[in-house]
Amino acid sequence: MMERNVVLYPGLGVGHLVPMVELAKVFLQHGVAVTVALVEPPSETLEFYAAVARIAASNPAVTFHELPPPPPAPAPAHAGSGSGSDGKSAKPIVQMLEFLNSMKAPLRDFLLSLPSVDALIIDMFCGDALDVAAGLRLPVYSSFTSAASDLAVFLNLASMQDSISFGELGDSIIPFPGVPPFKASELPSNILSDEEACRCVLHMLGRIPESKGILVNTFDSLEARALSALRDGLCVPGRATPPIYCIGPLVSGGGGDKDDECLRWLDAQPDNSVVFLSFGSMGTFGKKQLEEIAIGLQKSEQRFLWVVRSPRVDENNLAEPLQMADLDALLPAGFTEATNGRGLVVKSWAPQVDVLRHRATGAFVTHCGWNSTLEAITAGQPLLCWPLYAEQRMNKVFIVEEMKVGVAIDGYDEEMVKAEEVEAKVRWVMECECSEALRQRVAEVKDAATKALDEGGSSRSAFVKFLQDLRPPMA
Ligand code: UDP
């Protein structure tokens, strides 16, 4: 019998690649051959290259194939976007979607070069690959790399985009099926602040139901309400929602370099004593905000491990390449000396999964990226939520109000989070008995996550069901 063979297409972004590689490992465990088709970013995003190299090195069993760059002709405007073709005035998200659109030909050539492919699994931003697969009569499944609650909202938004001007909603509350009511201002800024970006993003997300099924990196009991709304067809009015397979939490296994500076430093700290601050693969702060965080941490008198990046020139341009942080120039004078021994600041990157699972770590200040959220849940860490970009403000709502595994850091939606707030929330989670209920809830959710992945658990069964639904292997 010929073995089955699938191609995974993660598009761009570390947060999209990480769960796709974890998904590749699950396929391999089930005896399905898998190739991850990588896209070379159009601009020099060194962080992305470094992350790809790290991920590839720590997953030798996974086959990666780097697609060649798109044809040199000017990229066509993204279907349905109505954007200009020079791309210069467009937002980074629009440029990214246009670039992914231009990758259709290299993707098609690659798929044609393979002796057999049973399915193409695409990231939520790679909807143009649906056209490629249609031409090859190849089944396509979507991999949604954020929460099922986000999926519920996005599918709903896509269906209402012609009737609402999102930028005018202000702080009004929008009641979406399956999620707690939240203010329109918690929607991603791309949707709120730029008409073209809004149209492009929602057009792309609105294509997700065209796939044969949606794999979501979550587990049933974590987001029962959103999943019911999705499965009952409440989120895509007037159209059937394809089957939803909750197969998570898929998080990287960690187990990286034991000699890493962060891990060695944590080894010397008491159990559950360190608050870890890390803001995803792209999060940055301006110098003034970094100073406020530093003062808050210093005054909290708690142990901390903090990943610091250099500020961007344009804080809203996530595509801007990052410089190596100059800590002496960025942090307040005397901070390093004052916190010597109880705090460690690292530049740019920490082995996050290993840090979260370390016995010395006791809480996580996070930007609420979905991978970070799942990594914290599976490590049993309470979350202090400081959302920055993309869908993270919505995730904050779901984490705090629905999953109840974290609390918000006040001021994230204002000009500055004050040092007093950093101090207060860090003290609250690290030393106040009042945070005990939160810790207990996190422990329960961690337990539920483990059970979902066990033999007979909901996520394990969902993946088996998904494999059955895939076109059966040819005899
Ligand atoms: N990450 C890491 N070290 C860092 C920052 C990020 O290992 O210093 C990893 C993190 O563990 C996660 C990914 O990068 O797997 C970030 O994904 P997430 O969805 O949380 O956020 P995004 O980067 O997409 O905003």
Image (tube, rainbow, N blue to C red):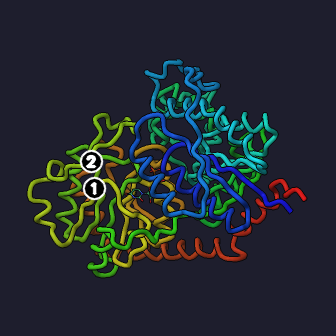
Residue 356 visible? The answer is yes
Q: Residues within 10 Å of mark 2 (few under 14, many from 20)?
A: few
On the image, the x and y values in percent for residue 209 come to 72, 42
Q: Depth check: 36 or 145 in front?
A: 36
In the image, which disc is placed on residue 347?
A: 1
Looking at the image, which residue is at 54% across and 51% down?
A: 17
Furthest-bottom residue in view? 270
Mark 2 vs ligand 1: CB below 8 Å: no
Crowd rating for badge 1 (residues with CA inside 10 Å; few <14, some 14–19, many 20+): some
* Percent coordinates x, y for residue 141 in the rendering: 72, 48
Residue 320 coordinates in the image, percent (x, y): 36, 36
Instruction: State which quadrant residue 275 falls in.
Output: bottom left
In the rendered structure, the answer to whether residue 74 lies left or right of residue 170 reads: right
Q: Residue at x 41, y 41 (%)?
A: 45
Tell me, yes or no, whether the two marked residues, 1 and 2, touch with CB atoms within 8 Å. Answer: yes
- Above-or-below relation of 447 to 95: below
Judged from the image, the secondary structure of the residue bearing numbered disc 1 is strand
In the image, 44 versus 254, the foreground residue is: 44
Distance from disc 1 to disc 2, alpha carbons, whole Å, reads 7 Å
